[in-house]
């Protein structure tokens, strides 16, 4: 069986509280060998770590999502630094900017984003970055914050922005959106595969044919098959490349 890695999921979301074991088993049975469970505030970051302690295949990230920047306490950097000492924590984030929703002041978002980028740099960990309708400001912060590595998760911008991100040495990651947002097809067709990863962003953004339903890590297989077809390469080759990219980026152990 081919192996896949879900590089970004939120199985620490309350939607999975009742059947988490079954969700993970379905993923493993589908060929998902490793999962990255992503924190979005201090509570979900701690929950991600606790989940990772129970499964050898699961790793955690800890961070403050832009939606939660105004709600977090002022000791968040110290708490995240403490979380990062756990052996299963492989990145800082989810951090970034979100101008689609008005959940937090843009100035506050920028401050918390910069703080977390600096923390990631200091710790030598990758940054998991959220970007929604904030390309210009986000890019400026990335340029200002040198000597770090990271991934723009759930990439939804155009090819021009993808090229700028890749030219900075960063990665980009694609969700099930690729199965129903045609503008992403050009991005995928024009970029090299050595700097991309795939993710479900579960429980959100389920790919076709599961749109409207709760997304699960097992569906990363559908995303892989769709992108491989777009790139006109065999699924085995694509799967192996995604494994290599993701393991290298997060410094994951081999299984």
Image (tube, helix red, strand yellow):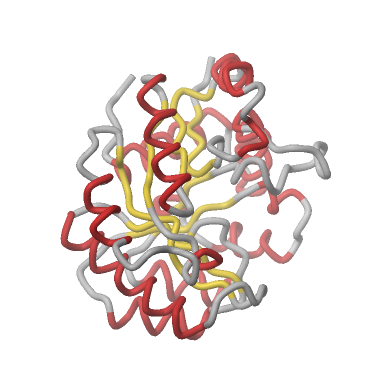
In the rendered image, the quadrant that contains the N terminus is top right
The x, y position of residue 151, in whole percent, is 41, 58
The x, y position of residue 19, in whole percent, is 65, 21
238 vs 30: above or below: below
The x, y position of residue 220, in whole percent, is 61, 35
Which residue sits at x=47%, y=61%?
152
Quick check: 212 left or right of 172?
right
20 vs 238: above or below: above
In this view, the residue in front, 156 or 78, is 78
Quick check: 220 left or right of 108?
right
The quarter holding residue 95 reads bottom left
Which residue sits at x=60%, y=32%?
217
Quick check: 148 left or right of 199?
left
Which residue sits at x=30%, y=40%?
89
Picture mark count: 0
In the rendered image, the quadrant that contains the C terminus is top left
Quick check: 156 left or right of 50?
right
The x, y position of residue 75, in whole percent, is 29, 63
Which residue sits at x=58%, y=33%?
234
């Amino acid at each position: 069986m081919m192996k896949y890695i879900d590089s970004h999921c939120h199985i620490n979301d309350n939607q999975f509280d009742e059947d988490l074991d079954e969700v993970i088993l379905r993923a493993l049975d589908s060929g998902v060998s490793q999962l990255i469970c992503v924190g979005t505030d201090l509570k979900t970051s701690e929950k991600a770590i606790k989940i990772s302690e129970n499964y050898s295949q699961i790793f955690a990230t800890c961070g403050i999502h832009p939606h939660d920047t105004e709600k977090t306490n002022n000791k968040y950097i110290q708490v995240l630094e403490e979380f990062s000492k756990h052996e299963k924590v492989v990145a800082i984030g989810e951090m970034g900017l979100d101008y689609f929703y008005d959940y937090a002041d843009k100035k506050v978002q920028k401050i918390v984003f910069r703080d977390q980028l600096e923390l990631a740099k200091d710790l030598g960990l990758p940054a998991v970055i959220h970007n929604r309708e904030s390309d210009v400001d986000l890019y400026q912060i990335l340029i200002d914050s040198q000597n770090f590595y990271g991934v723009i998760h759930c990439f939804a911008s155009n090819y021009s922005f993808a090229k700028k991100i890749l030219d900075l040495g960063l990665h980009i990651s694609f969700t099930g959106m690729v199965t129903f947002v045609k503008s992403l097809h050009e991005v995928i067709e024009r970029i090299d595969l050595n700097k991309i990863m795939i993710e479900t962003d579960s429980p959100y953004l389920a790919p076709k044919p599961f749109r409207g339903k709760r997304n699960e890590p097992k569906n990363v297989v559908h995303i892989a098959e769709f992108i491989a077809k777009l790139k006109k390469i065999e699924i085995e080759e694509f799967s192996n490349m995604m494994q290599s990219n993701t393991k290298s980026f997060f410094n994951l152990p081999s299984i």
